[in-house]
Each structure stands twice: as C-alpha cells, then as structure tokens.
Image (tube, rainbow, N blue to C red):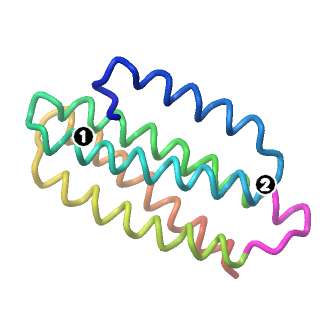
Amino acid sequence: LLPDNPLYILKAGRDRIVSILISDPIKKANFYLLAADKRLNEGVFLFNKGEKKYSLGESTISKGENYFEKGISEIEMAKKQGLTVKDISKRFHLASLKHKEIIKGLIDKTRGDVRQGLILDERRVENFEKRTNLLKQ
C-alpha cells in the first residue's frame, strides 16, 4: 500500500496510534526505525513508477526521515534514563548509512525541486549518522 493509494491514510493513522501506545523508549525507537525504513522503501517504489511520482516519492522519504529523527530522540531519552542503548544505536547508525546510500542513488535520477528535496534529506541523514555515532560510544 503506497501513498498514492486512497487507503494509505488508514495505514498512516494506524502507525500514529501504535506510536502513541508504545511507552518504552527503546521499543518506540525500534518502531520508528521500522516506520522510517518502510517510508524509504515506499519512496523508492514511487520513484520506480516514473517521473510523475517523483515528488510524492521525495515527500514520502522526507516523512520517513522524520520518523528516523524521532527514533534517535527516543534513544537519547533512553540513554538519559540510564538504559543501555549501544545495540539500538548501532542499528540506527547502520540504517543511516543505508538510507544515505539509497537517497544518493535517487539524487542521481532527479533534477529540480525533487533533487533539492533529496539533497536536504541526504544532509539530514548525514546528521543522523553523526548523532548515532555519538550514541554508540
């Protein structure tokens, strides 16, 4: 179910409800990473549908990176609470490298506003990479 489907709003709503119901910061971070990965994958599928879907694909990827950022914030909160975050920080760090790789590949396919949006997404992911690297220590 991709964002160009009218029923996608139900999927997005479900994700919001699930995120509210999770109270443990480590579990919530894992959920956010899963959501970020799904959105990135959805964005790639939209790009594969052709140029008419590029803008929606970039928007979907950007929303996924919002989830990624929320996940990092949850890890930072967990660390402040004294929880062990080494493993999840490592997982997020590896995911940031993969997100960056995929976004770089999409930048090469695009131009104009979509390209600029992807470049901003790439910069955000580079920042995530730095933040997760610090959390791993």
Q: Residue lying at the far top in this picture: please name it.
A: 6
Residue 114 spot, x, y in % from top left:
21, 36
Look at mark 2 in the image and give the residue it sits on. 25
- Residue under the point 39% across and 21% down: 7
Which region of the structure is painted magenta? 77-85
Q: What residue type is labelled 1?
A: Gln
Image point (59%, 30%), residue name:
14
Q: SS of the residue at dot 2?
A: helix
Alpha-carbon neighbours of circle 1 within 10 Å: few (<14), some, or many (≥20)?
some
Residue 130 in picture, x, y percent from top left: 54, 68
The x and y percentages for residue 93 are 53, 71
Q: Is mark 1 on a helix, strand or loop?
A: helix
The residue to which callout 1 is attached is 116
Measured from the top left, where is residue 85 in percent x and y? 75, 72
| Rendered view: 4 above or below 102 | above
Q: Give me the residue at 71% from left, 51% from top.
A: 28
